[in-house]
């Protein structure tokens, strides 16, 4: 894995891991399954992913009103999804081109733990999330094996415990609603572990005291009061054209 800046991974390395690596494909399958139990659908909603969340946004492409993949500048950006109109946007870590309160579902993967300004990042998350919206934070689990291996992206940045993550979210006006742990299979490419991955995931919940999952997921909602501290101004910041009203068709000769 290649680091860019202090803690960020290079977007090409992330792409290679998730789309050209057996471990990455296993992560996609396992985390998506857990997400489906939390967010079974997003019909007519605006779904935004930040960090390198695009591998987990695909199930919502067909029914969501809009899907947007925000990727931080230090990481870099790739075109996504293949064979469809691009929805990936390069942005500053704490200055997103989205209007205030317009996001229904916000997913962070490889975003919070690698940020050099996590407090400002959480304030930006709070700003864009709409009333009744849901934010899902996916981070490396401090107690899991995956955070101790630099063979995967979960071995970089700051791993969290559930208490640490929920405390940080509460400090920035989020209300944790539920949590989950997944990715119980070892971060190994050896054939035995790949063939038995499904078994480890099924047993994971029962063995969590002994074999903690590699990924911690916390779903949180937005509290009604504004976040404490100076924060970031709740203003429109050159919102993406995708979020603007569609212009009326022009009639006349072609």
Image (tube, rainbow, N blue to C red):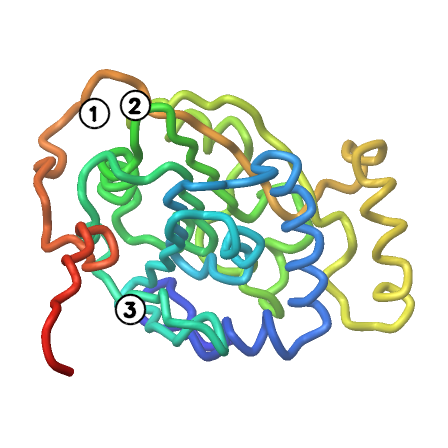
Tag 1, which secondary structure? loop
Using the rendered image of the protein, determine whether residue 171 is visible from the camera's viewpoint. Answer: no
Number of marks present in the image shown: 3
Residue 122 numbered mark, or none: none
State whether residue 27 is above or below residue 177: below
Residue 227 numbered mark, or none: 1
Using the rendered image of the protein, determine whether residue 229 is visible from the camera's viewpoint. Answer: yes
Instruction: Name the quadrant containing residue 235.
Output: top left
Q: Residue furthest front?
A: 253
- Residue 213 placement (x, y as % from top left): 70, 43
Q: Residue furthest top?
A: 225
**Residue that badge 2 annotates:** 173
210 vs 112, left or right, is right
Find out whether the residues at labels 3 and 2 contact each other: C-beta distance under 8 Å. Answer: no
Q: Reading the chain from its start, which is encountered first: label 3 or label 2?
A: 3
**Residue that badge 3 annotates:** 74
State whether residue 213 is above or below residue 56: above
Mark 1–mark 3 Cα distance, whole angstroms, equals 26 Å
Find out whether the residues at labels 2 and 1 contact each other: C-beta distance under 8 Å. Answer: yes
């Amino acid at each position: 894995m290649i680091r860019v800046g202090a803690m960020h991974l290079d977007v090409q390395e992330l792409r290679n891991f998730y789309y050209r690596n057996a471990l990455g494909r296993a992560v996609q399958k396992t985390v998506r399954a857990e997400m489906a139990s939390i967010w079974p659908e997003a019909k007519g909603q605006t779904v935004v992913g930040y960090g390198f969340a695009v591998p987990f946004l695909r199930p919502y492409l067909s029914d969501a009103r809009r899907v947007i993949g925000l990727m931080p500048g230090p990481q870099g950006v790739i075109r996504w999804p293949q064979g469809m109109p691009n929805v990936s946007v390069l942005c500053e870590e704490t200055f997103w081109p989205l209007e205030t309160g317009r996001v229904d579902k916000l997913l962070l993967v490889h975003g919070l733990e690698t940020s050099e300004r996590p407090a400002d990042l959480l304030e930006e998350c709070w700003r864009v999330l709409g009333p009744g919206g849901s934010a899902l934070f996916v981070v490396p689990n401090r107690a899991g094996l995956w955070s101790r291996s630099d063979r995967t992206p979960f071995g970089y940045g700051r791993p969290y415990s559930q208490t640490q993550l929920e405390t940080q979210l509460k400090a920035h006006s989020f209300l944790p609603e539920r949590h989950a742990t997944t990715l119980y299979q070892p971060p190994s490419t050896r054939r035995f572990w790949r063939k038995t991955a499904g078994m480890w995931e099924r047993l994971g919940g029962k063995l969590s005291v002994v074999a903690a999952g590699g990924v911690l997921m916390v779903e949180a909602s937005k509290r009604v009061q504004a976040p404490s501290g100076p924060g970031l101004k709740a203003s429109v910041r050159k919102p993406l054209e995708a979020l603007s009203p569609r212009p009326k068709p022009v009639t006349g000769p072609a």
